[in-house]
Each structure stands twice: as structure tokens, then as C-alpha cells.
Amino acid sequence: MDSVDKILFLLSHGGDTLIVQIYVDDIIFGGSSHALVSSFAEQISRKFEMSLMGELQFFLGLQIKQGPEGTFVHQAKYTRDILKKFEMGDSKPMMTPMSTNTVLDADEDGEAVDQKKFRGMIGSLLYLTATRPDIQFAVCLCARYQASSRTSHRQAVKRIFRYLKFTPELGLWYSSEGSQMLTMLAAGLIASQPPAHANSYELLLSLGPLASKLVYPCLPQKQNT
């Protein structure tokens, strides 16, 4: 059992590794040896009534495409589903998730919007950040105003959806080649957001060559100036 993820199990056997991930009554597993994977599938099928679905292609809203050069994980179907759900399917596409001139604040004098719908939009976008680190900063910025969202906040969220309309197929590419070195990048905005004028910074963790775009975002943090 993994020390961090209690539903992730790892087995090392004769130089090979088997990885098993459990979510409620769904199990995905794979390994470095076809014989080890087949043996596990046979043993667990004897103990439990289960259906083997073959090579992993879809799991919890994630779409997986595997090939000799690597694995591509994306949420294109989920993206189109939430565009339709929040009536943004016919919106004008945008090339970026937010404008470089966008500065959000509490906007206390602004017109209030439907809080339930706003939170639903934020929640849907947060789940999408599992494979879309390119929208995480913008989503987390908008998420600060869920308790008292205004028209300006909703417009910023809609901008993210319009960007998704332009880029529904983006995702994470896990290359099977090259180094698996862990690289960390940091970016920050000094005194960027009123009224507290806090410093915002974000860390990006890349596993493997940077060109492969294996980027794992950490949540943006704030520090008061």
C-alpha cells in the first residue's frame, strides 16, 4: 500500500512492478510485465466476480490513449459535456483562459449572480484541472469569490469556458522515452490582487522531459505583502 494514497497498491516481483488502483468498486491495474499483469487478473477473478474491460481507455471522466511512444490522458468528452451543461457550447472561442489585464476583486457594488450555478461552474472546472494545468490559475482565482460572486466573476469564469471551446482536446502527454527527472518551475505575481494586494505564486512540477509537458500544478498560494 502506498504511504500517501491508501487505495494505491504496488507489488515488486523479480524486478517487475505491478500497480493497482482502487476506486469504490472499480479497479485499474498495470505493470512492467505482461505475465505479472495476467497472473494478477487471473487470481483476482477467482476470488471476486468481475468483468475485465481490456486496455484502459476511460476512467472517472479521464480518457486514456496508449501507444508505444507514450500515454495521452485528456478529458475532451467531459469538456464538451460541461460546455453543454452551462450553455457555453455555442460561445465564441478564446485563445487564452484569462486576459492579461484581468484583476478580480470582491466587486461589492457589482450585481450578484446565481451562487449555486457559479459554484457548479467552478466545481466542474476544478475537476478538469486534473489534466488541464493551463486553466488552474484562472480557475483558482475565480474560486476565491464563490461565497459572494458577482457579474465580473461570472464573466471571468465564462472566459475560461470560451477558452475550453477553443482547446477541448488538450491534455497530459506521458512520454515513454527520455529521463524521468522531476523538475520544478515557479511563477509569481507581486501584489497582484486587491484589496489585500497579496503576492500570488504557483509551482509547476514536471516529471520527465519538459518538452513532454508532463506538468502537475500545485494550488496557487497567497502571501500578504
Image (cartoon, helix red, strand yellow):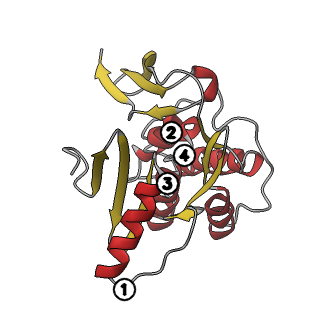
**Element at label 4:** loop
Point out residue 73 in the picture as x, y percentages from the top left corner: 59, 49
Residue located at (46% from left, 38% from top) = 141
Q: Earlier in the sequence, mark 3 or mark 1?
A: 3
Point out residue 178 in the picture as x, y percentages from the top left corner: 57, 22
Which marked residue is nearer to the observer: mark 3 or mark 1? 3
Q: Earlier in the sequence, mark 1 or mark 2?
A: 1
Which marked residue is nearer to the observer: mark 2 or mark 4? 4
Judge left or right: residue 140 versus residue 66: left
Q: Earlier in the sequence, mark 4 or mark 1?
A: 1
Which marked residue is nearer to the observer: mark 3 or mark 4? 3
Which marked residue is nearer to the observer: mark 1 or mark 2? 1
- Point out which mark residue 131 bears: 4
- Point out which mark residue 153 bears: none
Residue corresponding to mark 3: 34
Q: Earlier in the sequence, mark 3 or mark 4?
A: 3
For marks 4 and 1, give the CA distance: 32 Å
Residue corresponding to mark 2: 136
**Element at label 3:** helix
**Element at label 1:** loop
| Circle 3/circle 1 CB separation < 8 Å | no
For marks 3 and 4, give the CA distance: 27 Å
- Point out which mark residue 49 bears: 1
Amino acid, disc 2:
Gln
